[in-house]
Image (cartoon, rainbow, N blue to C red):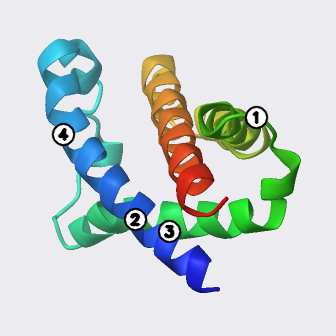
Amino acid sequence: MKKIISSGFISGIILFVLSYGGLFISIRFFPQLYTDYNNPLFNADGSRDIFFYLHAFVFSFALSWFWSRFKGMFKGSFIIRGLEFGMVYALVALLPVMWITFSSLDITLNIVLSWFMYGFIQAIIAGIVFAKVNA
């Protein structure tokens, strides 16, 4: 349990920093994508912003538990194990969630694809961290 918590916390910090920095970089280089967010679906009063900032930690702890259960199935170097972990997560969890999200909400395909890539990259980074910290 200690390894799940410690590797989840380390991964959470890394994902938080990369996600927050990546947001500013992606707005700079892909401004058209962010105009799609001018949608009533995304208007919030700010009372739940803390959930957005904590998502990297929630995500990391969940993936850390998943890693601890199935890490023996991933073979190779820590980078290969991280990539495979990210692919498994993307196919098993992200693809179905993004499919139902796109089919049920009035959002663009670009938004869904960016969310898919975002989650996929986060899972790869977390997998690499877990492979190094919690082999």
For label 3, the SS is helix
For label 2, the SS is helix
Which numbered disc, 2 or 4, marks the residue that appears first in the sequence? 2
Q: Given this view, does label 1 or label 4 mark the residue nearer the observer?
A: 1
Quadrant (top left/top right/bottom left/bottom right) for the N terminus: bottom right
Q: Looking at the picture, does residue 131 appear above or below residue 76?
A: below
What kind of residue is marked 1? Answer: Gly
Residue 76: numbered disc: 1
Residue at coordinates 51% horizontally, 61% vertically from top-left?
Answer: 59
Q: What's the CA distance linking mark 2 and mark 3?
A: 6 Å
The image position of residue 74, as x and y in percent, is 80, 43
The image position of residue 95, as x and y in percent, is 70, 34
Q: What's the CA distance linking mark 2 and mark 4?
A: 17 Å
Q: Looking at the picture, does residue 29 appear above or below residue 23?
A: above
Q: Nearer the viewer, residue 134 or 30?
A: 134
What kind of residue is marked 3? Answer: Gly
Residue 8: numbered disc: 3
